[in-house]
Structure formats: structure tokens, C-alpha cells
Image (spheres, rainbow, N blue to C red):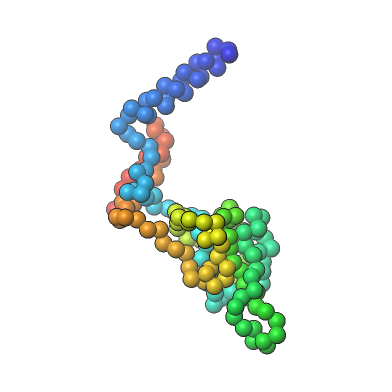
Amino acid sequence: MSVDKTIRHVKALATGIKYLVSSKRMTLMYPDEIEEFPDGYRGMIKYNWDTCIKCGLCAMVCPADAMKMYISKEESEEGKKPVRRPGINYARCVFCGFCVAICPTNSLKFTKVHDVVYNTLEEQVYPPEKFREGVPKPQYKKKPKKMRAILDEERGLRYEPVE
């Protein structure tokens, strides 16, 4: 290894040790503290059943194949052809926002929820009827303190309580 690389490795280790022993931590103590997310944050997707026109654009544009059109249990008006509505598989979703952007009726919107726990992969699949119910709320043992990330020129990110 060259001397230049050795010096850079030592500097990187020194920086890590400095923050390890420093009283100024750079992380949140989750779940006691949670970050307040800015507007436009891409969390789980909320679906408005009533405004959806069932066009299927969301499923067509999804690069991860997370959005699919499912045959809904509702009856069509003519009673002849099945009604197809969107559903989502959060195990596949990459939260790119293409489905939200392409929806002509704004039936899909991002929420600020991202930290929901599932026990199985099957629980992450939301067919239309489950997608209609909305985004599950994260559950905490005690109410967490909301924190806001602030960019500090010297330290990088630091967190301050939201008042």
C-alpha cells in the first residue's frame, strides 16, 4: 500500500473514533426519537378508491412491477366484464413516484409513513380492497419525540427537537 493510501486510512479511522467517543451523536435514538419528514417525502402510497378511474397507467409505468391491476370484488355496472383496480406489493416497491406522477386523477399520493413492520411477505401485498383501507400507522410503545435534521457545516447532519 502506498504512503498516501495509508495516511487516508488513518485519517478515516481517526474521524470514526472521534465520533465514536464524542458526546455529540449523529443518529436518532429510534424509536424514542423519529425524524420529521419534509413535504414531498416519498413514504407509503395512499389510494383514493372513489376518484380512481381504473385506467391502469400506474401499473404500466411501475419499473419494479409493484403496482398491478387486480380483478376487484366489486360488480361492474353492466355486470358483464370484471372491474380491475390497482393494488401494490410493498416488498417490490422502490418508492420512485412514477405511479403517483402519472395518475390523471391524483388517486395515488405519498404519505410520510415508512416504518411499518410486517411478519411475512404476503402481508406486504395490498390488493385493491386492502389498498383502499389506507396506510397502516406505525405503532410505538410510547409516543416518540419528533426531530428535524439540520445541516451543520462542521459536523454534517445534526438533529434538533421539533417544537
Q: Residue at x 46, y 20 (%)?
A: 11
Left or right relative to 162: residue 51: right
Residue sitting at the far top? 3
Residue 28 in the image, given as x and y percentages of width and height? 37, 43
> Can residue 126 be spotted in the picture?
yes
Q: Is residue 39 above or below residue 3?
A: below
Residue 65 in the image, given as x and y percentages of width and height? 65, 58
Viewer-closest of 34 and 160: 34
Q: Is residue 73 above or below residue 134?
A: below
Residue sitting at the far bottom? 78
Viewer-closest of 58 and 138: 138
Q: Quadrant of residue 95?
A: bottom right
Residue 17 in the image, given as x and y percentages of width and height? 39, 25
Viewer-closest of 29 and 157: 29
Q: How many marks?
A: 0
Q: Residue at x 47, y 18 (%)?
A: 10
> Can residue 106 be spotted in the picture?
no
Residue 77 in the image, given as x and y percentages of width and height? 64, 86
Q: Is residue 90 above or below residue 52?
A: above
Q: Quadrant of residue 66?
A: bottom right
Q: Residue at x 38, y 37 (%)?
A: 26
Q: Residue at x 55, y 14 (%)?
A: 4
* Quarter containing the N terminus: top right
